[in-house]
Image (cartoon, helix red, strand yellow):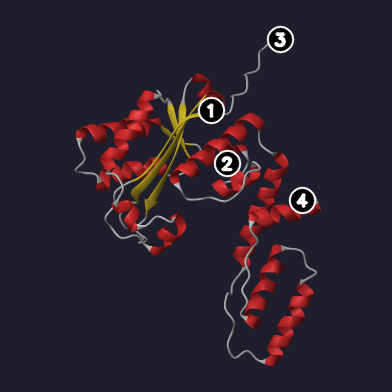
Amino acid sequence: MSKMKKRNTNRRSKPKKKSFCVADWIREGRVAFLDSEFVTSQQKGGPPSKLVSVGLVICQKNFEEVERFHSYIFNDESLHDKFRELTNITEEMLLRAPSYEQVMREIAKKLREWNVKKIFVWGPDQMVIAQDLKYYRTDVSKHTRKAVNVMLPLMMDIEEIYSKKLKMRSIGIANLKLLCGLKPSVSHDALEDAVDLKNIIAYMDIHGCPKRAANVLRQYMKEKEIYYRYRRFHEKWEGISDEVLIKCNALMQELENVENMEARALKDDLHVIATGEDAAFEELEVFFEKANRKKI
């Protein structure tokens, strides 16, 4: 009878792989946080987004800022109303702005001077800058093209990485700011958004994930998604009979005592059908205040 091999009980377990952390990069050298503003074509399948503003904040150990940079980029094309409303950027501001070459050379110079090892972004900035160079900047000098092509590999989108740490899908900067105890507004100014990103990542890396706040945010995103999935109407129905209005009001009163998002969506649909007064899901800040009262 063959002898059974003894199980090796002294085998070392593999160490857990350490999760990615920007703070580890800062201990090794200086890094930058970058944000950009760009104009989209507003057409499905239209040309790629065009870069009109770049903001950059450079940090060293303990997230200490050593340099800030912001500039608009010259553009002589008209802007659509949604972009102007969102960013407060106007055609006049861009007509007075430095050229693309001037801006990119200045950014490259600052990155070299501070020996920046990595540039962190939140979202599609790297792709936008790459496509902008390829599509709109065919006449730039070889020197500028080379400077941008050196910059692009340094850029890293950390949106998915930090969203996974919070066990959520992609999270907006405004939501992250609220999670970290910061004012949740987003300016849509490239420099201010870059600074916001730096402050958020610094908080997350130093203090860790605020578990209770993250639970509230997950609950908010879940309820909001269900609410809008079930909402159907946003305008008053014309010619609605008094009999139907009475039934609407009666059903709305019954739904007041039903605590789920489907019922809330139906109640708000009935309300707008009967009165023309539409409703929307509350802002995250309001949801947080309610959660604090309920101790979710």
Residue on which the image places disc 4: 292
* Residue drawn at 67 percent across, 77 percent down: 271
Secondary element at tag 1: strand
Answer with the quarter of the image where residue 116 lies. top left
Q: Secondary structure at mark 2?
A: helix
Q: CA distance from mark 4 to mark 3?
A: 56 Å
Calculate the distance from the C-alpha at mark 1 to the C-alpha at mark 3.
Answer: 55 Å
- The residue type indicated by label 3 comes to Lys
Kind of residue at badge 4: Asn
Q: Earlier in the sequence, mark 4 or mark 3?
A: 3
The mark nearer the N terminus, 4 or 1, is 1
Q: Nearer the viewer, mark 4 or mark 3?
A: 4
- The relative height of residue 208 versus residue 265 in the rendered view (above or below) is above
| Amino acid found under the numbered disc labelled 1 | Glu
Q: Quadrant of residue 16?
A: top right
Q: Circle 3 sits on which residue?
A: 6
Badge 2 amino acid: Ser
Pointer 2: what residue?
163
Residue at which label 1 appears:
64
